[in-house]
Image (spheres, rainbow, N blue to C red):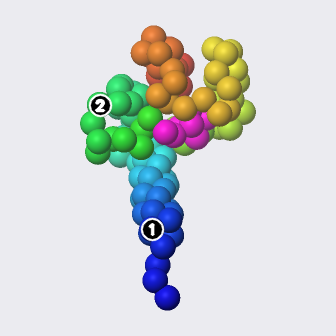
């Protein structure tokens, strides 16, 4: 039985999504472990393909992974600036990113 083009395309999409999820997890882990700072990650989410995952990660996930910042404080800071839990890094202005870095770093 031949494999349909749709099945092949679906497989390709699933592979790319799995790769993106892995990049997101490694990004969050790098902040949690101290290999990267929040300022580095939020500097420019669209800078290059190697950092493509930065634009897709939720701000709340990054904020919660900063050492010394808990879930409650991270969510409060985001709420104070009108940013919801489902706000992605690429959706935030440079000024808002700078304010978040100042408050959370």
The number of discs equals: 2
The foreground one among 31 and 6 is: 6
Q: Earlier in the sequence, mark 2 or mark 1?
A: 1
| Label drawn at residue 5 | 1
Magenta segment includes 30: no
Residue 29 visible in the current orientation: no
Classified by dominant secondary structure, the portion drawn in magenta counts as: helix
The foreground one among 57 and 13 is: 13
On screen, residue 75 versus residue 15, left or right, reads right
- Percent across and percent down for residue 88 are 55, 32
Span of residues in magenta: 56-63
Q: Mark 1: few, some, or many residues within 10 Å (few <14, many ≥20)?
A: few
Tag 2 residue: 47
* Front disc: 2 or 1: 1
| Residue in view at x 63 percent, y 14 percent | 81
Which element carries disc 2, helix, strand or loop? loop
| Label drawn at residue 78 | none
Q: Does residue 12 lie above or below 86 as drawn?
A: below
């Amino acid at each position: 039985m031949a494999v349909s083009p749709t099945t092949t395309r679906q497989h390709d999409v699933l592979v790319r999504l799995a790769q993106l999820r892995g990049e997101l997890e490694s990004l969050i882990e790098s902040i949690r472990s101290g290999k990267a700072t929040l300022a580095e990650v939020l500097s420019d989410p669209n800078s290059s393909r190697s950092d493509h995952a930065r634009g897709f990660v939720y701000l709340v996930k990054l904020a919660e992974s900063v050492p010394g910042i808990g879930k409650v404080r991270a969510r409060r800071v985001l709420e104070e600036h009108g940013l919801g839990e489902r706000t992605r890094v690429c959706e935030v202005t440079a000024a808002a990113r700078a304010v978040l870095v100042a408050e959370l770093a």
